[in-house]
Image (spheres, grey):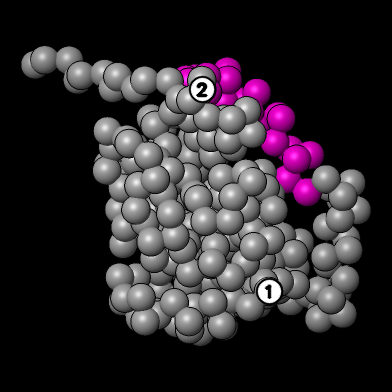
Amino acid sequence: MNAPEKLSIPSMKERVSAEEWQARVDLAACYRLVADFGWSDLVFTHVTARVPGTENQFLINPYGMMFDEITASSLVKIDLEGNKIEESPFPINPAGFTIHSAIHAVRHDAQCVLHVHSINGVAVSVQQEGVLPLSQQSIFVLSSLAYHDYEGVALNADEKPRLVADLGDKTYLMLRNHGLLTLGKTVADAFLNMYIFESACMIQIRAQSGGGELVRIPETIIRGAQQQAKSVTKAQGGMLAWPGLLRRLDRIDSSYRT
């Protein structure tokens, strides 16, 4: 059997601004972390980031590349319609950008939109009550959570107004029968939010599988969760954990930086 051909990806580092290059490195790292934490669905979900200093330029994964292969240079720059802004040897999935483009168009506070089809997340998304107040992780999610009902595979642009209306100003979005989505002012924030979201779902599924009566956290505690989150992260959000996560990746494989 022949060895698989290695991907040859020319470096973009000297062709983009220092700010865009940093955004590319962070987004590539996020893709690697999604794979490392077991949230990827082969090649069928997306993480997008706005190109710094722009309103309508975004970075997205090359379609068909596994998340643990993605590098800063392989990311594709597109506009709000999913059209390539500059030449790239890699294809993108315009249909996969439907959800992301809808959110990026109205949520200018969100530099990064992260969407996964994690097993635990989908399992909770099919439950009538959705996320339950069962864990410390769940209170942070419940303090800024929205739901959007399933309308089939996200191919129809007509769905966009309903999706953004359901999302509103929230940080966490549960796509019914589909998966999880988080927003962040930075890639690091979006990743930390997804870590918390997925953890809340995993704990819920495991707690329910025990078969015993579940103890719910009072609403009064949930109302103060956002302020508590700022205290826990020392108001740094995802940046508190991000350098350590990058060191973790570098120990495994630093090629995401290329």
Frontmost residue, 26 versus 251: 26
The image shows residue 10 at horizontal and vertical percentages of 36, 20
Q: Is residue 241 visible?
A: yes
Please count the marks in the image. 2
- Say what secondary structure mark 2 lies in: helix
Residue in the picture at 39% in, 65% down = 98
Task: Tell me the kind of residue under disc 1.
Answer: Asp
Q: What span is colored magenta in the figure?
A: 237-258
The image shows residue 164 at horizontal and vertical percentages of 54, 77
The image shows residue 183 at horizontal and vertical percentages of 62, 59
| Residue count near mark 1 (Cα–Cα under 10 Å), binned few <14, some 14–19, many ≥20 | some
Magenta stretch: residue 120 in it? Answer: no
| Residue count near mark 2 (Cα–Cα under 10 Å), binned few <14, some 14–19, many ≥20 | some
Residue in the picture at 53% in, 35% down = 24
Q: Is residue 22 visible?
A: no
What residue is disc 1 on?
169
The image shows residue 134 at horizontal and vertical percentages of 70, 70
What residue is disc 2 on?
13
- Residue 113 lies left or right of residue 140; in this view the side is left
Frontmost residue, 138 versus 244: 244
Magenta stretch: residue 257 in it? Answer: yes
Which dot marks residue 71?
Answer: none
Give above or below for 116 relative to 138: above
In whole angstroms, how far apart are the C-alphas of marks 1 and 2?
A: 34 Å
Residue 61: quadrant of the picture = top left
Give above or below for 169 relative to 112: below
Residue in the picture at 74% in, 64% down = 140
Task: Tell me the kind of residue under disc 2.
Answer: Lys
- Say what secondary structure mark 1 lies in: loop
Residue 110: quadrant of the picture = bottom right
User: What residue occupies the far top of the structure in this picture?
Assistant: 2
- Residue 47 lies left or right of residue 214; in this view the side is left
